[in-house]
Amino acid sequence: MNLSKRSQVDPFIVMDVMEAARAAEAEGRRIIHLEVGQPSTAAPQKARLAVREALDVNPLGYTVALGLPALREGIAQLYMSWYGVDLDPGRVIITSGSSAGFLLAFTALFDTDAKVGVAAPGYPSYRQILKALSLKPIDIPTHSKRGHQLRPQDVAMHSLDGLLVASPANPTGTMLDKLALKALADYAKQSGISFISDEIYHGIEYEKKAVTALEVTNNAYVINSFSKFFSMTGWRIGWLVVPEDHVRSVERLAQNMFICPPHVSQIAALAALECRVEMAINLKVYAENRRLMLEGLPQAGFTNIAPPDGAFYIYADISEFNVDSRVFAAQVLAKVGVAITPGLDFDPLRGGVTIRFSYAQSTHEITEGLRRLRAFMQTHYL
């Protein structure tokens, strides 16, 4: 029995780093986790309480494929609260995390061999999901001086059927302002290119509010999730906003591919929407961690970075040290017990000289991680 060509996707390197860190912990070592983009905080308290109550009175069976109406309404209200956007709840589709959102979006919008532009560096699973669907990801190089974000002139150099942008972006944490996002959306519309906006890190911003694509166009697919801002990674619950005339097509896909999102996670997500105060406390921790990283990484020798506007990542160029990023990450883990992610996960061509640092953990962990990084760099590279 043979595997399909579609199954031959690249590994998610950060998961390999996590496994190496887990093995080190199994040997009794204390590892500082700067590799994974996962909040260290639990799901909001009201979300957990809502699930406990529901389990006592509710069989938690199938829901409709589009998700609980109350949750779709709550997400529409979130857009009014955050952005002043009057969103029809009928355009909101609840998904099993953002990953299911990408599967639905890519399947709904593109036929086999369609070319979809993505920024490099960018979230690695974009490429691998596209490949698994027999689509063609087109890496479009970005530059640190422009915050590793795309411009219409970058996109115009390629013949594309679709364009996916992320703001705040993974692995850089940089954002597109309203004019820049509108320019990309307008270019996509004028060029007949389907436009997808990954907004999974919205809510985790520092000096300015992130802009949703729905502020500049109704002709876009918008993907978001409860994983990051609401600290619900393992609950696998997210949402997709699509143009009104696409809802029924995406609904049919969702019915057949997923039946429905997990009922229990939908109940938790609905309650999480009421936990803004708790989320604001978490955001203060990220902000302090960001401050420590922007101060501590240059002290450790990592000076070529693009300061993040949001999310909880910093992307650093290590080319001056003349070492492959995978080798470097392995050395840091082995010598001082800090797990970091090689840039090859995010940029297959240039990621051999970059590293992603995550500061999603507690402030105590960030402080200790920076101390260890300084010790390592002073011993080996400075």
Image (tube, helix red, strand yellow):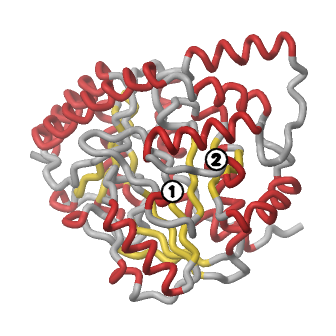
Q: CA distance from mark 1 to mark 2?
A: 11 Å
Q: Which quadrant is home to the C terminus?
A: top left
- Which residue is located at x 72 percent, y 80 percent? 112
Q: Which residue is mark 2?
A: 239
Q: Residue at x 57, y 29 (%)?
A: 273
Graded by Cα atoms within 10 Å as few (under 14), some (14 to 19) or many (20 or more), the crowding at tag 2 reads: many
Q: Secondary structure at mark 2?
A: strand
Q: Residue at x 55, y 53 (%)?
A: 12
> Which circle's residue, 1 or 2, is located before the other in the chain?
1
The local secondary structure at tag 1 comes to strand
- Considering only vertical position in the picture, is 62 above or below 192? above
Is the residue 251 above or below the residue 163 in the image?
A: above
Residue type of the residue flagged with mark 1: Asp
Q: Residues within 10 Å of mark 1 (few under 14, many from 20)?
A: many
**Left or right of 373: which side holds 78?**
right
Pointer 1: what residue? 198
Residue at image x 73%, y 68%? 245
Can residue 13 be seen?
yes
Q: Amino acid at mark 2?
A: Trp
Label drawn at residue 375: none
Rendering coords of residue 363 (x, y %)? 30, 22
